[in-house]
Every structure is written in structure tokens, then in C-alpha cells.
Image: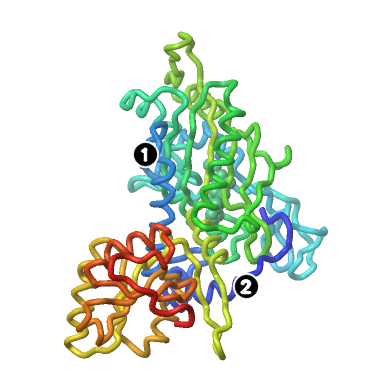
Amino acid sequence: MVTEHTPGKVDMEKIVSLCRRRGFIFPSSEIYGGLSSCWDYGPLGVELKRNIKEAWWQAVVRERDDMIGLDASILMHPQVWAASGHLEGFSDPLADCKSCHQRWRADDLKGDNCPNCGGELTEPRQFNLMFKTFMGPVEDDASTVYLRPETAQGIFVNFQNVLNTTRKRLPFGIAQTGKAFRNEITTGNFIFRSREFEQMEIEYFVKPGTDQKWFDYWLEERFNWYLKLGMKKENLKLRQHTHKELAHYAKDCYDIDFLFPMGWAELEGVANRTDFDLKQHANSSGKNLEYFDDETKEHYIPYVIEPSAGVDRSALAFLCDAYAEERDKDEIRVLLHLHPALAPIKVAVLPLSRKENLASVAKEIYSELRQCWMMQYDDAQSIGRRYRRQDEIGTPLCVTIDFQSLEDEQATIRERDSMNQIRVPIKELKTTLQAKLAGEDLFVLPPGGQIWKEGKA
Ligand code: GAP
């Protein structure tokens, strides 16, 4: 939900245009005129998205003893959605205009009439947001299945499987990334709200009574994750759900809101889902989903804390947060201040000329370094134009090979944000780039290195 209309500093049109122009994001099926609210991630977008998921997985699974991963299927037993409450309650109230037949979310309407033509509106009706499809060759009610509207349920129904196979003790969590589908009524704001999107969800199982402590813990942990990846603090805030807004399963919920171009809006939700889901699935499936606490010798259904983030929304937020325009002489330099962990291209190799002797050295460096990072090799147009191209897609470092490199076996490293340059021996390139991508100051020099230029490159 967009809460306040205080527009962020970046114009959404500029982000959309950059994404289109540079191959981050395209409208789905564009040659057929596009498909409403579906998007395709191009060569740079797919890298950005993978990097976001990778950074999340690293932080919430690989670096923790109390977390494990899962990859459940999108299609699930239809009873899952009856038990979870989605069949009954996952709906928006809709009103139709009797004149122009446009459909509106009743809670978005300001007055009694159609915002489009002023026509009379029908009484609001509930519209379920789940996409239906059919399993097998017969299209009847018995074969109806749903595309999951959240990845969370795949975790709940596997709770006992994970418990039995990993012998985890409470508190512990299960993490999952994957596609989710919702037949949203109001879409728009680019990839902010689409009908097919990706989620990064954690279900963290705790002993009842300790849930508030873990709720506070995850709220802070998740907020800090965005900050660690370079997001500006002034673009983030926490917002508690009002009682009316709370989902049917939640005891408490906070949104981590980001200042998107259209205003503050949800980036991630952190909810206390209590024991609602496990209890529902235990009742519905007839399976025992209790946990046996060996310390207290009690059997109970754990409570669940759920930090649930959107990959696409994160991508949009990181892009908006990183976007900058700087005056550089008579030009405007457009750049993305993306954190190196998120930047689609980490290092670009730029030979000053296409001459064979220079190109062969540059290509050798490129083929060695690409074993470590996503790289680009660019030898087209002036070096200034090439730096600008890399700035615009957020490449943190460029390596330039010039004619002097052939004699002194050194190369220049140029930093995106400061435009400062250092010159280092080619044999020191890999370790130097590694250190700079990990956050070391550019002017900390390797053996034989020197400061080359400050700014303006
Ligand atoms: N399991 C809880 C759950 O799904 P949610 O607040 O409905 O909660 C979690 O969704 C996150 O998924 C949101 O914070 C948002 O980042 C992302 N999300 C939800 N609906 C979306 C949509 N239609 N398009 C893009 N992202 C969406």
C-alpha cells in the first residue's frame, strides 16, 4: 500500500527509460504489444536480480547456523489454499462502473462514482487474487490448481520434512526464493506491483512466548540488510500495520517502507504469523505438525516470524536509491551508485585502442578476470564515452590498458563514484580489484602502485 504521496527524488520515467535503454528490464512479449504488468529482465537486469537473491541467501542462509534453504514447487495441493485461508480470504473488494465497465478496487475509491467517467458503480464484490489453472487434460473443478500467491506455504507444508531430515532445534528458520503470482487489480509503477513476481521469504519457527523477541530481532536484521547493501537510511522507514490492515494470520506486522518515486511504499513485510499456518495445515491434513521440545519435554506448535521481501521491488528500490545525475563540465553524468555486490558488471576492461598488440594484452586480462567476476569488454568509441556507459549501469571499476601498459606492464583502475584512478602492475590487478570491490579505499596501493589521477575521468 502506498501510504503517503511524498514523491522520492528520482523520476520513475528516468528509471524506466534507463532500464529499457540499457537492457535491465523490458515489457513482457513486447513485440506483441506487451502483456500488462509482466516484465522481462534483460542481460543486466537478470544479473542485478541474481545478485540481490545471492546477497539475501548469503546473509540469511549461508552465514547462519539457524537457517536452511528450500525450493518448493509453485503448484501445490489445492487443499493448501483452503487451509491457509487464501481461497476464502485472499481477495480485494471490487466495484465495476456500469457505464465504462472499468473495474476499481473499492478501497482505492474516493467517492461514489467512477473516477474514469463519473458513471454509477456496482456494490463492491470480493475478487480472489489467485490465478487458477488445471492439472492434467480435463478442465473440471476436480483438477483445478492455483499458482501460488506466496512462497510461504511451501515452507509450512515442509516443516516436518525439514525437521526430520535436519534435526534442527528451535529457534530455526527456512528460507526460500521463488515466483509468486497474484491477479492484482491495480498494477503499475513499473515493477513495483506486477502479476508475476519473485519473493524472498523466511519462516522462522520459535517457541510461543519468545515470538516478540524474535519479531523485534528480524525487523532490525532485515532493515539493516538494506543499509549494508548501501541503501540510504533516509529512504527507508518502518511502519506498523493498523489493526484493520493486518492479514488474517497476523498478530503484528511492520512494513519496511522505501521512498519510491511515487511515495513511501512497502518493500518488505515482517509479520508475526503465530501458530496459525501450522495449526491450519495440521487440522486440514490430519498430520501432526507439533514440535517436541527435548529440554522441557513439551509438545507444541511453534510460532512463526515471517520476513517477506520482494525481489522485483528490491531491484526497483536499489535502482532508485542508486540513481544519480552529476554535472560534469557541459554534460550530465548519469550513474548508478550500486553496491559492488549488486552491480551487474563488476569490472569493465577497456583497451585504449583496437590495435592488435594492445587488444591481445587486454583480452588476456579480461579472460583471466572473468573467472572471478561478471565482466564486460568494451573497445568501441572514446574512452570517455565508455566510462559513461559503465557509470550508467553501475560498474564500480574500469581497467584501462594503454600503450604504456605494453612497456611498463601496468594498467589503470578507475573508480566509478570518485572517478579517481590508480595505476598498478598487471600482476597485482586481481588482488587489487578484489580488495577494492570488498570496500578498500582506492588510494590504498599495492606494491608498485601509484595514484594516477584524481577525479574527472
Ligand atoms: N507471505 C507473506 C506475503 O506474501 P506480502 O506483503 O503480500 O506478504 C511480501 O508480500 C512481499 O512480496 C512484499 O513486501 C513485496 O515486496 C512483494 N510483493 C507482494 N505483491 C507483489 C506484487 N504484486 N508485485 C511485486 N511484488 C510484490
Q: Mark 2 highlights which residue?
A: 11
Left or right of 115? Residue 176 is left
Of 388 and 439, which appears nearest the observer? 439
Q: Residue 408 appears in which quarter of the rendering?
A: bottom left
For residue 70, which numbered disc appears in the image?
A: 1
Q: Report the residue at 43% width, 44% height from top.
A: 59
Q: Is residue 252 above or below residue 437?
A: above
Q: Amino acid at mark 1?
A: Leu
Q: Residue 369, how many percent across, how many down?
A: 25, 66
Q: Residue 70 appears in which quarter of the rendering?
A: top left
Q: Report the residue at 43% width, 55% height from top.
A: 52
Which circle, 2 or 1, is nearer the viewer? 2
Residue 265 makes an appearance in the image: yes
Which is nearer the N-term, disc 2 or disc 1? 2
Of 348 and 448, which appears nearest the observer? 448
Q: Report the residue at 73% width, 63% height from top.
A: 6
Q: Residue furthest right?
A: 111
Q: CA distance from mark 2 to mark 1?
A: 37 Å
